[in-house]
Image (cartoon, rainbow, N blue to C red):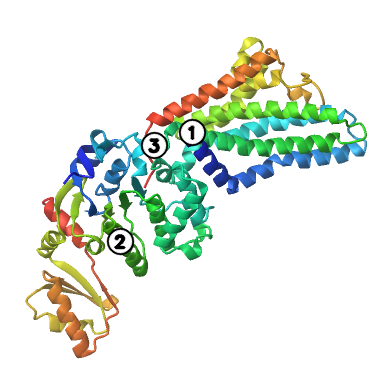
């Protein structure tokens, strides 16, 4: 299959700071996720792919055409930047129809497309409100709407789920899947594995400006599962919980945080751990106030892959 | 290119006419109207005996020509690029099918239109407040049209220069202030052809009924050695074209970054 997006030997520096280094990449139709911790080079790569930045070495081609200084490519490409920035004085509708007018559509066509895009992200009801009055979720959705309003074949979405509440995340995930169903090529970046899991199985791991691995979600999961997970549970019965779970063979370490009424488990088998935890909650009527992961599993995988 | 410029013009004219900055500059422009009202009241009390034309020329020279058009041009022209970078809205613009040159020219025209409306409305109303009495003739309106045309040309030239500075420098305001209120003022007191290295020189060369030391504020005016009006107009047009072309050229090849 011909690659829709092709990055050839891309390198980019910011002064002495490395953005990305020797990146070679081919992206086909469907959803591809660029996964990496903050500062990994995801945004740099996306900015180069969308012609915002010029690579120091290498080039990007979209449908075989160069991207840098090629404005015509933007008829086929929609970009949702990571930054939460807008022309705040405009309403969602004015923002979209204004940007659409830059494609040369008639006023009626701009309005029709703006309405359609706002409907797709479920913002029709607030379309005439100023963007500055929008919630974080609405702002994220209007940003996505501007990327898809001109109906491009390619969508580049930089951290589209960042900072969203669960309901908004679900809406965006559903929308991205619908767009995939329409045959579009979608490149999404994220630093959160569960978000990426919900979107696609095609993942590119990027760290310190380099592509570390590429594969499906099972491959990534395998990498993660070879590493211990830290799980912090806050409960008034945290000592009892620790006593019961201490006997399980997948628990590697337990540490207490009495001042926080919490206990931290280290396990190399998350699924078994949570399955047993669920049973205990039901059997002993445990009160669980909070479950968090103090370490970043994804970071652990990257550290492992780069040999730290 | 023309169509793309037109699209950028429409978008930014619509966008900026709603902005808080535009409202502030409308208020600033209309300070001249308040000033005209105060002077009119003062004159009615018999305290200022010079003719209305001379009084208006004082306001024109000190407020409009040496202050307002420079301020308007500086803050709109130098922000053409920086507002997108500082506001982090640049990706919305740079991912559209419009050329870099069209962005510069389209935004320049949009801001020239906005600032011209502010300027000309303030000039006309101030003029009428000061001159509308039993001696006023419709033919006098010709004078205000000429004054407005000169100020418009000045605004266009300064805006073009500051647009160029905005594309070239990361922080153009300080350099712009030094140019607008330093260089432009000081150099005009120099004799000979040195004063021709300023935009203000050509503007003052084409002002109607210009006298070098008229009115109470005459001492603030320059010792003008005027250029011929036609040449002055051509020079101003040349300044507009050259600096706008340079701005478009720099903008097409320079890479702009903002902090994430």
- The answer as to whether the residues below labels 2 and 1 share one chain is no
Residue under circle 3?
B256
Q: Are marks 2 and 3 on the same chain?
A: no
- Is A303 rendered above or below residue B149? below
Does mark 3 fall on the same chain as mark 1?
yes
Q: Residue A279, relative to residue A62: is it above or below?
A: below
Mark yes or no: residue B27 visible.
yes
Q: Quadrant of residue A298?
A: bottom left
Q: Quadrant of residue B71?
A: top right
Which residue shows up at 68% across the image and 36% down it? B119
Q: Is residue A194 left or right of residue B53?
A: left
Residue A289's x, y, as percent?
Answer: 30, 79
Judge left or right: residue B35 versus residue A72: right
Q: Which residue is mark 2?
A: A178
Query: Is the residue marked by circle 2 packed among few (<14), some (14-19), or many (20+) residues within 10 Å?
Result: few
Host chain of mark 3: B
Judging by the rendered image, the residue that carries numbered circle 1 is: B104
| Outermost residue to the left | A249
SS state under label 2: helix
């Amino acid at each position: 299959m011909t690659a829709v997006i092709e990055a050839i030997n891309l390198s980019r520096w910011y002064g002495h700071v490395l953005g990305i280094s020797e990146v070679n990449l081919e992206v086909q139709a469907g959803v591809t996720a660029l996964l990496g911790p903050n500062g990994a080079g995801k945004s740099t790569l996306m900015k180069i792919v969308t012609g915002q930045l010029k690579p120091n070495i290498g080039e990007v081609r979209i449908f075989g055409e160069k991207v840098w200084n090629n404005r015509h490519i933007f008829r086929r490409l929609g970009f949702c930047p990571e930054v939460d920035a807008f022309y705040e004085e405009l309403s969602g509708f004015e923002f979209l129809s204004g940007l659409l007018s830059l494609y040369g559509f008639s006023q009626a066509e701009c309005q029709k497309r703006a309405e359609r895009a706002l409907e797709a992200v479920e913002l029709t009801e607030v379309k005439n409100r100023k963007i500055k009055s929008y919630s974080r979720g609405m702002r994220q959705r209007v940003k996505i709407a501007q990327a898809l309003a001109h109906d491009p074949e390619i969508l580049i979405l930089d951290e589209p789920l960042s900072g969203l509440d669960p309901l908004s995340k679900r809406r965006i995930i559903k929308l991205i899947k619908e767009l995939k169903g329409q045959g579009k090529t979608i490149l999404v970046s994220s630093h959160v594995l569960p978000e990426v899991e919900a979107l696609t199985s095609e993942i590119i791991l990027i760290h310190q400006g380099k592509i570390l691995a590429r594969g499906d979600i099972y491959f990534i999961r395998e990498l993660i599962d070879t590493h211990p997970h830290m799980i912090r549970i806050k409960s008034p019965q945290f000592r009892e919980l620790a006593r019961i779970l201490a006997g399980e063979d997948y628990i590697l370490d337990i540490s207490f945080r009495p001042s926080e009424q919490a206990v931290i488990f280290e396990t190399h088998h998350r699924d078994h751990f949570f399955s047993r935890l669920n049973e205990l909650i039901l059997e002993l009527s445990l009160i669980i106030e909070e479950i968090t992961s103090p370490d970043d599993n994804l970071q652990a995988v990257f550290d492992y892959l780069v040999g730290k | 290119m023309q169509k793309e410029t037109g699209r950028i013009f429409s978008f930014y004219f619509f966008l900026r006419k709603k902005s808080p900055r535009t409202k502030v500059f409308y208020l600033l422009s209309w300070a001249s109207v308040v000033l005209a009202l105060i002077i009119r009241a003062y004159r009615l009390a018999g305290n200022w005996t010079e003719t209305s034309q001379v009084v208006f020329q004082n306001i024109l020279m000190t407020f409009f020509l040496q202050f307002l058009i420079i301020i308007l041009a500086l803050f709109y022209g130098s922000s053409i690029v920086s507002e997108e970078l500082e506001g982090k809205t640049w990706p919305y613009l740079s991912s559209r099918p419009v050329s870099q040159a069209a962005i510069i020219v389209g935004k320049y025209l949009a801001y020239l239109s906005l600032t011209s409306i502010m300027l000309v409305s303030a000039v006309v109303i101030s003029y009428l407040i000061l001159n509308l009495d039993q001696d006023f003739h419709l033919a006098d309106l010709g004078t205000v049209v000429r004054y407005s045309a000169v100020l418009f040309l000045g605004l266009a030239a300064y805006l073009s220069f500051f647009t160029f500075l905005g594309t070239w420098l990361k922080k153009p305001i300080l350099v712009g202030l030094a140019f607008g209120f330093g260089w432009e003022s000081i150099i005009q007191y120099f004799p000979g052809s040195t004063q021709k290295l300023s935009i203000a020189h050509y503007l003052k060369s084409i002002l109607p009924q210009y006298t070098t030391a008229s009115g109470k504020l005459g001492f603030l005016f320059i010792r003008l050695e005027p250029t011929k009006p036609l040449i002055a107009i051509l020079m101003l047009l040349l300044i507009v074209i050259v600096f706008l072309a340079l701005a478009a050229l720099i903008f097409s090849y320079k890479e702009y970054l903002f902090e994430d």
